[in-house]
Image (cartoon, rainbow, N blue to C red):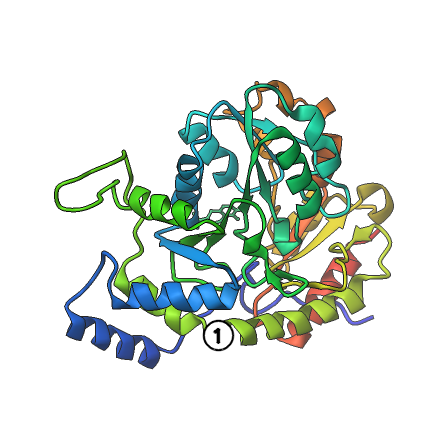
């Protein structure tokens, strides 16, 4: 067999999608002509409308990033006490609870979808619980029906961290239609981005009004400041980039879909590798990530070995999400962080590895990444 050579250049786990410089320059000229840089300018207004249509949601409010958006979501629903969430997520998810003086209660995840295990939520509810904050991890939808059913029965609010789920749909409904409020992140590494940015989407017009106040210091008008708000505003330059990027998202999604098919084809028969979950036929995915789980006992090598060894081939994968949030020094003292409470999350956190996924990768790149991965097997 031909020996595998390292890539000439580093292959990172992802790479932002760049619009052409000409498109950006043209939009910048519009902004310069308008003399309007931030605070609900024309680009902002147009992007809110365009995104609302794209995501098929009734109301949307733009933000300067997803984390501030999620902070405001908690404020808008007046959450307090404790909120049930997942340990298998990015740091921002539990941190927004802490910043709102709310205790995160970690619930175990489903071994297949890697999302919060809806079957276990009920046993975690206490009199202090005010909401469920679930994450559509890697764009796979949570069990939205079961979660809503539990929330309704116990009078809890539901917030979705949909940072990974831009453009995901269930039965032609935008993923943002589930729960009280959902957050999207438009960080540069996401399928769709505004360099930095984010949005909240909500069913209720009153919630949108409250959110719009909260993200602008609580300023109602020149004379009245009605609540302690924050600065969550998205500026005109990023909003303009976001308008351009809307033209790229379908193409980028399609490119990633083709790469996903190659990954699946190359890796589905490899013993000891578990691929991404299959979703119901009515789910439209976004293919933002490609994640495998390495079962050391069967693959003969650990996830950490694979991650480190890949670097010798100039391939930079990511242990996403490791460590679990329940393992952070700021959360590990919580009762719910005990590994006995989180058996599936603790196994998956040690197995999961995000492989390179972005539209500029070629089919040959992906086949080579797969060949390298397969060569590690013992
Ligand atoms: C699951 C999840 N939640 C929240 C965030 C935070 O979003 P932002 O970076 O836009 O603040 C991210 C990623 O960046 C994320 O992956």
- Residue 44 sits above or below residue 308 on the image: below
Q: Would you say 38 lies left or right of 104 here?
A: left
Q: Looking at the picture, how far across and down is residue 21, in whole percent?
A: 33, 77
163 left or right of 259? left
Image quadrant holding the N terminus, namely: bottom right
Q: Nearer the viewer, residue 143 or 237?
A: 143
One can see residue 7 in this view: yes
Q: Is residue 94 left or right of residue 76?
A: right
Residue 183: x and y in percent read 48, 49
**Pointer 1 local density, CA inside 10 Å: few below 14, some 14–19, many at least 20:** some
Above or below, 314 against 106 in this view is below
Q: Which residue is the site of mark 1? A: 248
- When asked about the image quadrant of residue 296, the answer is top right
Q: Of helix, strand and loop, which one carries label 1?
A: loop
Quarter of the figure with residue 311: bottom right
Q: Nearer the viewer, residue 120 or 274?
A: 120
Residue 186 seen in render: no
In which quadrant of the rendered view does residue 43 lie? bottom left
Q: x, y (%) of residue 45?
A: 31, 64
Residue found 68% across the figure and 63% down from its top: 171
């Amino acid at each position: 067999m031909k020996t595998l050579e390292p890539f000439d250049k580093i292959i990172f786990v992802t790479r932002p999608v760049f619009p052409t410089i000409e498109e950006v320059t043209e939009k910048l000229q519009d902004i310069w002509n308008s003399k309007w840089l931030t605070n609900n300018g024309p680009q902002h207004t147009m992007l809110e409308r365009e995104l609302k249509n794209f995501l098929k949601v009734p109301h949307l409010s733009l933000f300067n990033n997803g984390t501030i958006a999620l902070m405001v979501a908690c404020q808008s629903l007046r959450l307090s006490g404790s909120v049930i969430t997942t340990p298998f997520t990015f740091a921002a998810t539990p941190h927004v609870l802490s910043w709102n003086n709310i205790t995160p209660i970690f619930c175990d995840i489903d071994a297949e979808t890697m999302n919060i295990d809806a079957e276990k939520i009920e046993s975690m509810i206490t009199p202090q619980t005010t909401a469920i904050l679930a994450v559509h991890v890697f764009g796979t939808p949570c069990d939205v029906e079961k979660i809503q059913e539990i929330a309704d029965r116990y009078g809890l609010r539901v917030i979705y961290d949909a940072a990974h789920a831009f453009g995901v749909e269930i039965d032609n409904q935008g993923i943002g239609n589930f729960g009280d409020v959902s957050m999207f992140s438009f960080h540069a590494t996401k399928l769709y981005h505004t360099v930095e940015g984010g949005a909240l989407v909500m069913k209720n017009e009153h919630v949108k009004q409250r959110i719009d106040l909260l993200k602008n210091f609580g300023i109602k008008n020149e004379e009245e400041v009605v609540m302690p708000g924050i600065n969550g505003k998205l500026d005109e330059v990023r909003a303009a980039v976001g308008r351009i990027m809307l033209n790229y998202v379908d193409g980028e999604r399609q490119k990633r879909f083709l790469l996903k098919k190659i990954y699946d084809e190359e890796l589905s028969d490899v013993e000891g590798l578990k691929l991404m979950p299959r979703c119901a036929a009515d789910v439209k995915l976004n293919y933002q990530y490609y994640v495998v789980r390495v079962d050391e006992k069967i693959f003969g090598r650990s996830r950490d070995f694979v991650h480190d060894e890949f670097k010798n081939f100039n391939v930079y994968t990511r242990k996403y999400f490791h460590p679990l949030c329940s393992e952070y020094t700021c959360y590990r003292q919580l009762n719910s962080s005990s590994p006995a409470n989180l058996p599936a999350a603790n196994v998956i956190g040690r197995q999961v590895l995000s492989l390179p996924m972005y539209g500029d990768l070629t089919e040959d790149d992906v086949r080579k990444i797969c060949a390298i991965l397969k060569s590690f097997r013992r």
